[in-house]
Image (cartoon, helix red, strand yellow):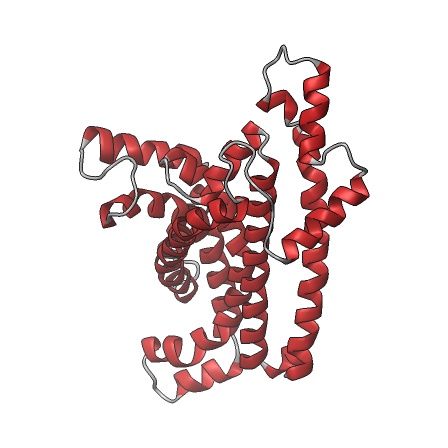
Amino acid sequence: MRQYVLGRLVQLVVVMIGISIVTFCLTYVLGDPSAVLLPMDAPPETRALFRKELGLDQPLIVQYARFASGAIRGDFGESFLMKKSALALVMERLPATYQLALAGLLFGLAIAVPLGTLAAYRRGSWIDNLCTMLAVAGQAIPIYWLGLMLMIVFAVQLRWLPASGYGEPANFVLPTIALGSFLAPITMRLVRSNMIDVLSQDYIRTARAKGLAGAVVLARHAFKNAALPVIAVLGLQFGQLLGGAVVTETVFSWPGVASFTVSSIANGDYPVVQAAVVILAASICIVNLSVDVLIGYLDPRIRQ
């Protein structure tokens, strides 16, 4: 088990190095920050001085070395616009994004696991067909459209829930439904597929032959073995949740780091974009590492 964990840690370090390189390079795709932060009629001398103050006139390898050494220490520089630590600005908004992602994950699982299990248990019936249709429809609905429809119906017309805001339990309902519905279809189909495979195994037939109730067979014997692939995929889907959070936070004006990153990209605020991307990528890597360790602990075959 120790060698398995050490191997995953080495992979994590390699991935983070690659992420730092990609993040540094992609920020230059945004364009020159002087074109955004300075007036359009600023003379070339002013632009050159501005770039020199930011260190953008140095060779790329020197800029990357400065960026990487600072990132290791947690120093991504100051925001061009707010003149505050970029990391501090990101960390202020990170809890809101994590809360929304966790709420969406729990909501998606609350829908996907029961429906996927029921569809597998009633394979070929109208219940199975209905669950499959719901999963396909859920995958086809864009998350931003669903968010807008939820807002129009429950916030504007019925006035049951707030359309935006943060801090109150009611503020979580609509964003959580939108984000959880983004995750549920894929998870439900995966649960159904794994449960169908497990329910065809010999030990399930033996449990049924002993006279055990269907619910007992599902809970004690089938679901435990079918859950391992689902747990593995949930680690990968955490990244998709953060991607979906970008749209969800924008639609519902959620004060998270995802929407803050989008606005920073539009404003050419390099330090904030770099800090946000590295922190979110590190979060995804840590979640996947935790999932790998958990699966390796639950299933010794994985460690081998």
Above or below: residue 204 compared with residue 253: below
Say which residue appears at 41% left-offset and 39% top-offset: 249
Where does residue 219 sit, x and y in percent of width and height?
A: 37, 76
Q: Nearer the viewer, residue 97 or 151?
A: 97
Where does residue 101 sit, x and y in percent of width and height?
A: 42, 52
Q: In the displayed structure, does residue 29 sit left or right of residue 79? A: right
Say which residue appears at 23% left-offset and 36% top-offset: 154
The quadrant of the rendering that contains the N terminus is: bottom right
Residue at the extreme top of the image, as rendered: 41
Where residue 137 sits, quadrant-wise, is: top left
Q: Nearer the viewer, residue 69 or 284?
A: 69
Say which residue appears at 65% left-offset and 52% top-offset: 70
Q: In the displayed structure, does residue 12 sit left or right of residue 280? A: right
Q: In the displayed structure, does residue 147 sit left or right of residue 202? A: left
Q: Total marks drawn?
A: 0
Determine if residue 130 is in view. yes
The quadrant of the rendering that contains the C terminus is: bottom right
Above or below: residue 42 compared with residue 7: above
Where does residue 126 sit, x and y in percent of width and height?
A: 36, 53
Q: Nearer the viewer, residue 107 or 12?
A: 12
Where residue 117 sits, quadrant-wise, is: bottom left
Say which residue appears at 61% left-offset and 83% top-offset: 300
Where residue 9 sits, quadrant-wise, is: bottom right
